Image (spheres, grey):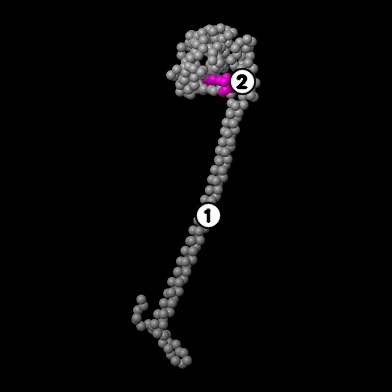
C-alpha cells in the first residue's frame, strides 16, 4: 500500500506551460518498477529451476547408462555361465551315451574263456560273458578280458570245501550255475569266498540271470538297503539277505533256491524257487 501523504512534485514547462505530475502517475511508475523486479526474480528462479532440472536429467541419464552397463555386464556373465552349464550338460549326455554304448554294444568285447576242459556241460560262453562285462565294477576290471575257470563242479567234484580252496584269494569272481531246467544265473563278487558265519562283501556285488529261451539278460545290483552280500559257512554259500536269500546253494552243490531279497530286490533267478544244479562254475577275471 502506498500512503496518500502529499509528495513534493517536480515542475516541468512544456510549450510554456507548467504541468504538475500527479501523485497517481508517480505511483504507477513505482508499480511498474516493482513489477519489473518481480519479473526479473521470476525469470531468475525459472532459469535456476531449469538448470536444476537439466542437472537432474543429466544425473538420471548417467544413472540409467550406469544401470544399462551393469545389466549388460550381468547379461554377459549369465550368458557365459549358461554356456558353461550347456557344456557341462553336453558332457553329461556324451558320458551317458558312452555308458549305454558300453552296455549294449557288447559285441566289441573280446573275452577269452580259459582252462575249460572238453566234454563238460559249459555254462558260461562268450555271449553271456559279453553281457556280464559292462556291469563289472570297479570299471578297471572291465579290462580283464581273460576269464579263467578255477572251479567246475564236473571237474573238481561237489564239495564246498574244495571250492573254497580253489577260489581262495581269487578276485573278481563270477559264479555261474545251470539248473536242470536249463536256466543260467549267478553272482559277481570282488571279495574271495571263505568260511565265515557273518556276512561280508560290498556294494559291487550283483546277481544276474540269463534266459536261453529269448536270449534276455538281467542284472540285479545292490539296493543299498543292507550289507548282506555274501555269507559262506561250511555247509552252504549264499548271496543277499533280508526276507530270504537271493541265491543259495548247499554244501553238495546239488540243491539250491532263489528268493526275492532286500539286498538286491531280485527276481527269482530260476523258473521256480527251489532248483537242482546241473553244473557250477567259478570264473576269475584276469588281465
Residue at image coords 50%, 11%: 255
- For this rendering, which residue is in front, 91 or 233? 233
Left or right of 1? Residue 217 is right
Magenta residue check for 275: no
In the picture, measured across the screen, residue 26 lies left or right of residue 161, that is left
Name the secondary structure under disc 2. Answer: helix
| Residue 127 image label | 2
Q: Position of residue 177 (x, y in %)?
A: 55, 14
Quarter residue 143 falls in: top right
Q: Secondary structure at mark 1?
A: helix
Q: Which quadrant holds the N terminus? A: bottom left
Q: Which residues are magenta?
A: 204-216
Residue 276 visible within the image: yes
Whether the magenta-drawn stretch holds residue 214 is answered as yes
Residue under the point 46% across and 90% down? 14
**Vertical side of 57 occupied by 171: above or below:** above
- Which one is in front in this view, the residue at disc 2 or the one at disc 1? 2
Q: Earlier in the sequence, mark 2 or mark 1?
A: 1
Q: 181 or 191: which is nearer to us? A: 181
Any part of residue 167 in sight: no
Looking at the rendering, in which quadrant would you find the C terminus? top right
Residue 6 falls in image quadrant? bottom left
Residue 62 marker: 1
| Distance CA(mark 2)–CA(mark 1) | 74 Å
Q: Residue 134, how many percent across, how many down?
A: 58, 23
Amino acid at each position: 500500500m502506498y500512503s496518500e501523504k502529499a509528495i513534493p512534485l517536480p515542475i516541468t514547462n512544456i510549450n510554456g506551460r507548467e504541468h504538475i505530475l500527479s501523485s497517481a502517475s508517480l505511483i504507477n511508475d513505482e508499480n511498474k518498477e516493482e513489477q519489473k523486479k518481480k519479473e526479473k526474480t521470476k525469470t531468475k528462479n525459472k532459469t535456476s529451476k531449469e538448470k536444476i532440472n537439466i542437472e537432474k536429467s543429466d544425473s538420471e541419464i548417467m544413472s540409467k547408462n550406469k544401470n544399462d552397463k551393469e545389466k549388460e555386464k550381468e547379461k554377459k556373465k549369465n550368458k557365459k555361465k549358461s554356456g558353461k552349464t550347456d557344456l557341462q550338460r553336453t558332457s553329461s549326455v556324451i558320458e551317458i551315451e558312452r555308458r549305454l554304448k558300453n552296455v549294449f554294444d557288447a559285441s566289441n568285447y573280446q573275452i577269452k574263456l580259459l582252462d575249460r576242459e572238453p566234454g563238460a556241460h559249459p555254462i558260461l560262453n562268450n555271449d553271456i560273458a559279453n553281457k556280464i562285462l559292462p556291469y563289472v565294477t570297479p570299471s578297471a576290471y572291465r579290462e580283464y578280458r581273460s576269464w579263467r575257470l578255477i572251479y567246475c563242479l564236473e571237474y573238481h567234484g561237489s564239495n564246498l570245501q574244495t571250492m573254497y580252496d580253489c577260489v581262495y584269494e581269487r578276485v573278481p569272481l563270477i559264479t555261474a550255475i545251470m539248473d536242470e531246467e536249463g536256466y543260467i544265473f549267478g553272482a559277481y563278487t570282488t571279495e574271495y569266498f571263505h568260511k565265515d558265519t557273518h556276512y561280508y562283501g560290498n556294494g559291487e556285488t550283483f546277481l544276474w540271470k540269463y534266459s536261453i529261451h529269448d536270449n534276455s539278460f538281467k542284472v540285479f545290483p545292490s539296493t543299498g538297503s543292507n550289507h548282506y552280500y555274501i555269507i559262506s559257512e561250511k555247509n552252504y554259500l549264499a548271496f543277499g539277505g533280508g526276507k530270504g536269500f537271493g541265491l543259495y546253494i548247499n554244501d553238495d552243490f546239488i540243491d539250491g533256491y532263489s528268493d526275492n531279497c532286500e539286498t538286491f530286490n531280485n527276481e527269482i533267478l530260476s523258473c521256480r524257487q527251489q532248483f537242482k544244479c546241473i553244473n557250477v562254475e567259478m570264473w576269475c577275471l584276469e588281465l
